[in-house]
Image (cartoon, rainbow, N blue to C red):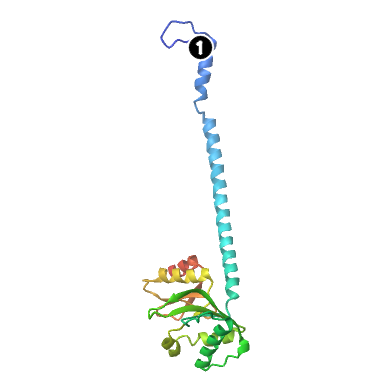
Amino acid sequence: MAAYNLRNKKVPVTYDDLINLFDEKLKDIATKKCIDDLKSIIEDQKKTIVKQQNEIECLKKEVRNLGNAQESLEQYGRRSNIRIVGVPPKDNETADECLAAVKKIIEDLDINIPDCCIDRAHRIGKVFTRIDGSTGQTILVKFTTWRHRTMIYKLRKNRYFKNKGIKIYLDLTKKRNELLTNAKEKANGIEHVDFVFADLNCQLGVKFKDSNKLSFFNDLDDLDMILDHE
């Protein structure tokens, strides 16, 4: 309305000017058809979002399964290993001296593990200081057979180890070890849970009170489902 004066001056307004004004105003008014079209678009977008969310959930589940499979494969490669914690390291200790310390433990335990069944033994991790002021460092021992590795692991509660201040552990992957720690924290305080553990095969499980049933899990989601159904 170029000819329209906001100061109320009486200027003639043509028919075309009024038509143009109505056209401009109608552009801002949503018709029923526009609303229906928008509703249709929104419904289509909702369906697309739901479909994409389902696809994302499927992909997340697949990634989770692939991650668990990869970790299980890595753990399988460690199943013949044990970790010995508490044997004081020597200055400039060689690999042969480390292996000799492991053989001395086997000799003291009086168990039949031939030398050929020990692939290697070496120190890993940082040197730590114990309560009595002595130093310690973990020894990783790789056996050639799962059976001989299990022989020494089953003796981990032997008085010999307690007297020497030595502890025997499974060689769990970093991910599985963290999962075991988190699972123990989650299960702590739940009345019907007896304990959370890692078995000889390095599988993580939970035992419930007043039951001989053992339930195994691969991640915290699995554990939640187990705890919810017991």
Residue 52 seen in the current view: yes
Q: Which residue is mark 1?
A: 2
Q: Which quarter of the figure has residue 184?
A: bottom left
Label 1 Cα neighbours within 10 Å, binned few <14 / some 14-19 / many ≥20: few
The structure residue drawn at horizontal position 53% and vertical position 10%, both measured from the top left corner, is 15
Is 131 situated above or below 114?
above
Q: Which kind of residue does numbered mark 1 sit on?
A: Ala
In this rendering, would 221 be left or right of 79? left
Residue 229 seen in the current view: no
- Residue 66 placement (x, y as % from top left): 59, 64
Q: Nearer the viewer, residue 102 or 173?
A: 102
- Residue 62 placement (x, y as % from top left): 59, 61
Q: Nearer the viewer, residue 151 or 165?
A: 165
The structure residue drawn at horizontal position 49% and vertical position 88%, both measured from the top left corner, is 155
The structure residue drawn at horizontal position 57% and vertical position 50%, both measured from the top left corner, is 52
User: Secondary structure under badge 1?
Assistant: loop
- Residue 156 placement (x, y as % from top left): 47, 85
The structure residue drawn at horizontal position 50% and vertical position 80%, both measured from the top left corner, is 91
**Farthest residue toward the bottom?**
110
Q: Which quarter of the figure has residue 187?
A: bottom left
- Residue 83 placement (x, y as % from top left): 52, 79
Q: Nearer the viewer, residue 2 or 72?
A: 72
